[in-house]
Amino acid sequence: MPRWEQGSEERLKQAAMELFAEQGFEGTTAVQIAERARVTTRTFFRYFSDKEEVLFADQEVLHDALVEGVLRTTDVAEPLRVVTLALAGFDWERLGSRESQHRRDAMIASHPGLLERDLIKQRRIADGISDALQRNGVDPDVADLAARVGIDVFRTAYRQWLDGDDDADLPTLTTTALSLLATIVPTAAG
Amino acid sequence: MPRWEQGSEERLKQAAMELFAEQGFEGTTAVQIAERARVTTRTFFRYFSDKEEVLFADQEVLHDALVEGVLRTTDVAEPLRVVTLALAGFDWERLGSRESQHRRDAMIASHPGLLERDLIKQRRIADGISDALQRNGVDPDVADLAARVGIDVFRTAYRQWLDGDDDADLPTLTTTALSLLATIVPTAAG
């Protein structure tokens, strides 16, 4: 892909986030996003099937990074920790500033159509992680549980990080959330 | 609602499941379902907004039963156990035979549109349970984590129950799944 096209994609994402913030998600059209990014509407649709998809442009990168991270971890004696480490270890800052991720998260939470799309993409990530664990020899039920619960734990930390109430980084918040889970799981003996 | 109308709803659900099994989900229309149930198409749409919704007709009952169950449990010292007990304690058999629930589950898994709807309904149930825990005094982060993880644990048990590989009942399978989770969560000290 030529360099100028990569530039278009970034400009489109930037323009979309600006317009969503200024005039709301519903009030923004693909045509307006293209105009603001100084590209044709046709170029917009070369990158994104609809305006919703702009918000999920990085999900493929995230999915692949997580699956590769889990596949590389051959020590799977603690599968839940493998999952939370892979999630916390991803370079989240590359998806944009914390503030813009916070806006994105709030926008998804308040639009059922976006939430549906987010949930199905999260499910795809959970399935990919579970599959990667199984390829490393983890039992299917354990792999599924570790993938889903690991994402729940990480979501707790990620939301705290987005809220920015304290200065802790994501890996620290994730470790704390995992400890929080440990306090509510009955011990193996109990 | 007059008794004969309740009969229509049950007949519509039954007819839909039969037709989905016989000719697939895509190949079945609301008109065909109404015909098989010997009601008018207009009656179909009095009960269901579309054929998809027939598969989720019991979600409201499930949501309310779970939320009420959690609200009634004032001892929330072990919030995760409260959630798994509420889920395992629901009378799942009232949603139809295990075999028909198995068919429903497989149908949802293989249709992205149904899966999206299922995920958003599951999310609504998780939010309802989390809210009920919070109304009983549980910290919001703990309540959210307990609701989501509790559903993950229960899903493991429910899938095993649907597969019917052993004769254990749902409460027993859920307890086993909770023990499985305990084996992969680092101890609070660790």
Image: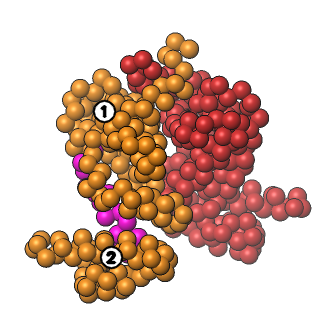
Chain colours: A orange, B red
The structure residue drawn at horizontal position 67% and vertical position 29%, both measured from the top left corner, is B76
| Image mark 2: chain | A
Residue A182 seen in this snapshot = yes
Query: Where A71 sits versus A105, above or below?
Result: above
Does the magenta-highlighted stretch encompass residue A58? yes
How would you classify the magenta stretch by its main secondary structure? helix
Residue bearing the label numbered 1 = A82
Q: Which residues are magenta?
A: A48-66
> Tag on residue A15?
2
| Image mark 1: chain | A
Instruction: Name the kind of residue labelled 2 in the image.
Output: Ala
The structure residue drawn at horizontal position 74% and vertical position 75%, both measured from the top left corner, is B42
In this image, A2 relative to A34: left or right? left
Q: Quadrant of residue B22?
A: bottom right
Q: Position of residue B69 (x, y in %)?
A: 73, 37
Residue B17 seen in this snapshot = no
In this image, A181 relative to A86: left or right? right
